[in-house]
Image (cartoon, rainbow, N blue to C red):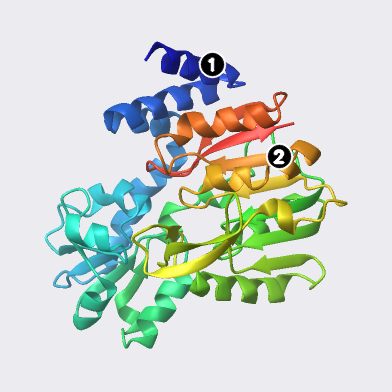
């Protein structure tokens, strides 16, 4: 126990500013206690605009739904959970819909979760898409299966103003001519935003194993980039090349899972990137596969010392394993933490050379 405490103290000392230290300490307390007050400590201090936006805008969304109309939230991830307080006491609220079979069995925060197949059987209820990723794919799925477009709403415009600048708003991040690795690119949104922030986007390596998301990614790539700039891979990132079980949800929560019903190929970042072209920025949001993906990028990180933006909230052990691994590879990295949502997700660890 004493050794673990010393390790956590060491990681805390590596944080470069007070905001990072406070986020790390509160996040750690949340992981240990599951007491949401620690997340509120972060959100109230560092995400005030997001909370104010929701307080004023989500009630407007609810007023758009007819008083007699029942509604359900499509997506039971952290986005929806963070805003459950706006819906839980509304007598029209039926619960969540989610692809995750475990959530369907266990429920989420005491609220029932139905499958998309069950949802399609209800021809009357309103559907509020409650995830900021994969909105287009979810809407297209619903429309193709006969849901009237007038029944489909989205929390997106109300919830995610700050998340649009995730990875780009910290004052310690600068962008020049970038060679970018987008691991878990989903709809290619992060890459498109980087294009707006840097002087030149020289090369992109984009990984997305969810086939539905990948189709969206390909369309965005064809529309916004020359073919010689972006290389897309319908594969996951990992510490070595192999085949793994995968749970595909057609949104940002698709993940590698032993309970998944599909199989995907995973590869290493090291084997894909051009060693003669310096990688300048690696972002990872791969739903719990961050550490294995970092191991598969170790040679690239040692050689090029790129900026790193790594999601650190998917697994409790990420709070110490990921900082330790990064500092082991490049001891001179400066570490920062930032939180980018009004829920318990979207906490990122930044490593700056």
Task: Give the numbered dot on residue 135.
Answer: none
Residue 116 point in image, percent of width and height: 28, 74
How dense is the environment of label 2, judged by Cα within 10 Å: few (below 14), some, or many (20 and up)?
A: many
How dense is the environment of label 1, judged by Cα within 10 Å: few (below 14), some, or many (20 and up)?
A: few
Residue appearing at x 78%, y 48% in the figure: 279
User: In the depicted view, which residue is nearer to us: 271 or 205?
Assistant: 271
Q: Is residue 351 visible?
A: yes
Left or right position of 118 against 269: left
User: In the depicted view, which residue is nearer to us: 150 or 351?
Assistant: 351
- Does the residue at mark 2 contact the one at mark 1 (Cβ under 8 Å)? no
User: In the depicted view, which residue is nearer to us: 327 or 222?
Assistant: 327
Residue 308 point in image, percent of width and height: 66, 40
6 shown above or below 353: above
Q: Residue furthest right?
A: 276
Distance (Cα) linking label 2 and label 1: 21 Å
51 shown above or below 64: above
Task: Give the numbered dot on residue 10.
Answer: 1
Left or right position of 221 against 266: right
Left or right position of 271 against 67: right
Residue 210 point in image, percent of width and height: 50, 68
Task: Give the numbered dot on residue 307.
Answer: 2
Residue 353 point in image, percent of width and height: 74, 31
Residue appearing at x 72%, y 70% in the figure: 224
How many tags in the picture? 2
Q: Is residue 171 visible?
A: no
The image quarter in which residue 142 lies? bottom left
Residue appearing at x 23%, y 75% in the figure: 119
Quick one: label 2 or label 1, which is nearer the N terminus? 1
- Look at the image and tell me in which quarter the N terminus lies: top left
SS for tag 2? strand
Which circle, 2 or 1, is nearer the viewer? 1
């Amino acid at each position: 126990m004493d050794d673990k405490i010393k390790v956590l103290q060491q990681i805390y000392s590596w944080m470069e500013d007070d905001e990072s230290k406070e986020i790390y300490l509160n996040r750690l307390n949340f992981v240990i206690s599951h007491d949401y007050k620690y997340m509120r400590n972060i959100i109230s201090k560092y995400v005030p605009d997001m909370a104010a936006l929701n307080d004023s805008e989500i009630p407007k969304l609810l007023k758009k739904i007819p008083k007699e109309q029942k509604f359900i939230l499509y997506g039971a991830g952290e986005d929806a959970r963070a805003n459950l307080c706006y819906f839980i006491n509304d007598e029209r609220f039926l619960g969540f819909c989610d692809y995750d079979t475990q959530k369907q069995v266990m429920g989420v925060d005491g609220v029932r979760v139905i499958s998309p197949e069950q949802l399609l059987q209800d021809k009357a209820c309103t559907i509020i898409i409650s995830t900021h990723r994969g909105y287009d794919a979810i809407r297209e799925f619903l429309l193709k299966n006969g849901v009237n477009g007038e029944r489909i709403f989205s929390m997106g415009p109300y919830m995610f103003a700050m998340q649009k600048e995730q990875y780009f708003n910290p004052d310690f991040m600068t962008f020049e001519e970038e060679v970018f690795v987008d691991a878990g690119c989903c709809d290619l949104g992060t890459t498109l935003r980087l294009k707006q922030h840097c002087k030149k986007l020289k090369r992109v390596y984009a990984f997305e194993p969810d086939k539905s998301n990948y189709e969206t990614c390909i369309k965005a790539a064809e529309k916004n980039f020359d073919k010689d700039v972006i290389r897309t891979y319908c594969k996951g990132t990992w510490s070595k090349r192999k085949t793994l079980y995968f749970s595909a949800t057609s949104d940002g929560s698709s993940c590698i899972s032993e309970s998944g019903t599909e199989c995907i190929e995973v590869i290493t970042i090291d084997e894909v990137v051009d060693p003669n072209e310096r990688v300048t920025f690696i972002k990872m949001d791969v739903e719990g596969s961050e550490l294995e993906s970092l191991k598969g990028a170790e040679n690239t990180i040692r050689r090029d010392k790129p900026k790193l933006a790594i999601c650190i909230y998917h697994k409790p052990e990420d709070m110490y394993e990921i900082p330790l691994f990064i500092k082991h590879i490049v001891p001179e990295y400066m570490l920062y933490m930032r939180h980018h949502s009004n829920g318990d997700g979207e906490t990122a660890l930044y490593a700056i050379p």
